[in-house]
Image: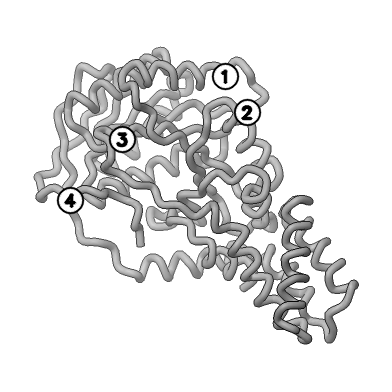
Amino acid sequence: MFRFFRSAPKPAPAEVKTPLVSSSATHAAPLSAAVKPEPSEGPRQSWLSKLKAGLRKTGGSIASVFTGTQIDDALYEELETALLLADTGVKATEHLLQDLKTRVKANKTTEPAAVKTLLIEAITDLLMPLQKQLHIGNQKPMVLMVAGVNGAGKTTSIGKLTHHLADQGASVLLAAADTFRAAAREQLAVWAQRNTVEIISQQGGDPAAVSFDAVSAGKARGRDVVLVDTAGRLPTQLHLMEELKKIKRVVQKADSTAPHEVLLVIDGNTGQNALMQVKAFDEALGLTGLIVTKLDGTAKGGVLCAIAREKAVPVYFIGVGEQLDDLQTFDAREFAEALLN
């Protein structure tokens, strides 16, 4: 269940109008999304099952360590290897092993199977700083700038996030600031149509200019949220990273308090590369949150532990599939339990 949305009361239901894909910020009719009932716990439980299945490769290799008959140095050595292979990282692995040994001693644990439960507790505590809700409603419009490398699932995640924002009664305006790739604009336009929201797009235009127009339009039309989709890029592409910085500066000209959130979408399959991306994009933009995607079959699910230990940027959402409800809020305990299911 999504708990991160509006702190202010929801607006009364309004007629949903057909979205308008415009070539500039001077075109597009106002639009309000109808308020729908709060989602039930059913989708959340279904999603948790998918998360457990997605992390099975990681969890299986770690859990197999606890099938022995005694707690000894060999067990901890095997666990260290399993954690490193799961891309937990050296620093996080060292931290977890030390924490686990302390818990084993404090609880006078003698059975290896019981150590697994203690490891879940240790991972939960390590991940807890990443658990944070995204609050919508403190600013209007709330400007969310979304970055990520090509193939990470950035535009799809924006589409899913737009769906849930609109589902909670928030009026959303999309900014197609990936102006150099026609497929990106078309993909975002499809999501806009699917979610019945507005989109500001300019073929071949300047990404910063599109972002400025979108924020200005969002303010003028009283939108709750402006989502800015930026072009995918690698952190080593310095000229493109400078383009991201420019977008942020120009957005601030349209609204001195914006962007209110700077989100990075990372692919959970990429392991330590994801950690490198977090560090690079945080240095360039000052990240406020992460969306972790594609945790649906990876053996590298331990990367969140590495992020928590080395660059604790909050994880607002994690995704495990292609369905709209496959993007859900991050919960440290749920993730730790799924990791060692």
- Give the spatial CA distance, label 4 vs label 3: 15 Å
Q: Please tell me which of labels 4 and 3 falls first in the chain.
A: 4
For badge 2, the amino acid type reads: Leu
| Residue that extends furthest to the right in the rendered view of this protein | 74
The residue carrying mark 1 is 240
Q: Please tell me which of labels 1 and 2 falls first in the chain.
A: 2
> Dividing the picture into quarters, in which one does residue 122 lie?
bottom right
Observer-nearest of 246 and 73 = 73
- Reply above or below: 153 against 300: above
Quarter of the image where the N terminus is located? bottom left
For badge 3, the amino acid type reads: Met
Q: Nearer the viewer, mark 3 or mark 2?
A: 3
Neighbourhood count class around disc 4 (C-alpha, 10 Å): few under 14, some 14–19, many 20 upward: few
Number of the label disc, if any, that sits on residue 9: 4
Q: Nearer the viewer, mark 1 or mark 3?
A: 3
Neighbourhood count class around disc 1 (C-alpha, 10 Å): few under 14, some 14–19, many 20 upward: some
**Residue 13 screen position, x and y as percent:** 11, 50
Q: Secondary structure at mark 2?
A: loop
Q: Secondary structure at mark 1?
A: helix
For badge 1, the amino acid type reads: Leu
| Residue that extends furthest to the front in the rendered view of this protein | 106
Q: Please tell me which of labels 1 and 3 falls first in the chain.
A: 3
- Give the spatial CA distance, label 1 vs label 4: 40 Å
The residue carrying mark 2 is 234
